[in-house]
Image (cartoon, rainbow, N blue to C red):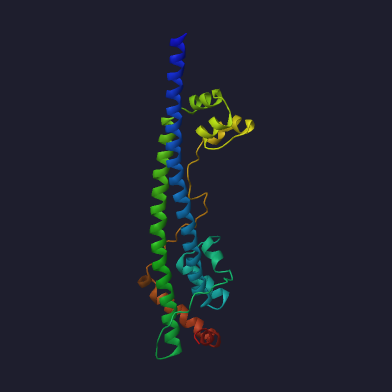
Amino acid sequence: MMEEDLMSSLTRQVKEEVIQNYLTERRLVSIQIEEIESRVKQLKQRAVWLGMRLNRLAQLMIREEMKERLFALLRIPRPSFWRESTEKQFSRRLRLIRVSGLTDRRRFRKLVLESYVRFHDRMVEYGKAHGELQLECDAINRNIMNFQKNFDLLNILSFLRSLDVEAVERKHFLGENFTAEELASVDEKLYIRPVSLEESAIPTPLVLPMPHSIENNLIDLSDEVFKKCERQVRGLML
């Protein structure tokens, strides 16, 4: 009888250690997921600011048909987050870039070119950050997969359900007090979903033409806008 009690006690201690290891490893994975969620939030905000830069560039085209020609030149798809950004009225506006030139036409050319260069460069930075975040998501998903493999959830569940479910023990093993209904569905709660940038709705970076490759096209476009909408263009540059 004493041997049985001893074996039962040792078995329980081993299982308790397994549970503690499980909770520790799960918490580490949860911290990694929280860090990714924070990075996702920051990247989304960067996308909003990028959308504002594109919005500024689009507004320089004045007319809708000129905007469409710009979008075709930059290969901006419809529908997309980026195209939708050009249709929004932002509560905060980016400052108009200050440029110099002998004539208003030349100043407007420089304004269009510089606006695109800045948008292009920020998009390259955004694309790099997006790629790095995707790699981190892949790494965390591998950690999640290894975590699920390293712990036999069915055995852990069996042990949890065999515990005396007094409040103190539930708090010790699970970190908080669970009702009977919550404890019955703990198997579902134990599952950790992989992280996904697609589900986070982060805008996909654009692959934009290099500024020097479309410089002449942008100059022609800006000259045509200036010719058709000279009064509005002068008003923009005041």
Give the residue furthest to the left.
212
Q: Give the percent coordinates (x, y) of residue 30.
A: 46, 43
State the residue at coordinates (41%, 83%).
99
Judge by depth and name the residue closer to the eye, 141 or 205: 141
Q: In the displayed structure, would residue 12 be above or below residue 83?
A: above
Judge by depth and name the residue closer to the eye, 121 or 69: 121
From the viewer's perspective, is 184 left or right of 215?
right
Q: In the displayed structure, would residue 157 be above or below residue 134?
A: above
Judge by depth and name the residue closer to the eye, 152 or 207: 152
Q: Give the percent coordinates (x, y) of residue 187.
A: 55, 31
- Asked if one can make out residue 30 in the rendered structure from this viewpoint, the answer is yes
Q: Give the percent coordinates (x, y) of residue 65.
A: 56, 74
Q: In the displayed structure, would residue 163 be above or below residue 227?
A: above
Q: In the displayed structure, would residue 47 be above or below residue 93?
A: above
Number of marks present in the image shown: 0
Judge by depth and name the residue closer to the eye, 10 or 122: 10
- Asked if one can make out residue 208 in the rendered structure from this viewpoint, the answer is no
Q: Give the percent coordinates (x, y) of residue 70.
A: 49, 71
From the viewer's perspective, is 94 left or right of 117?
right
Q: Which picture quadrant has residue 164?
A: top right
Give the residue furthest to the bottom.
102
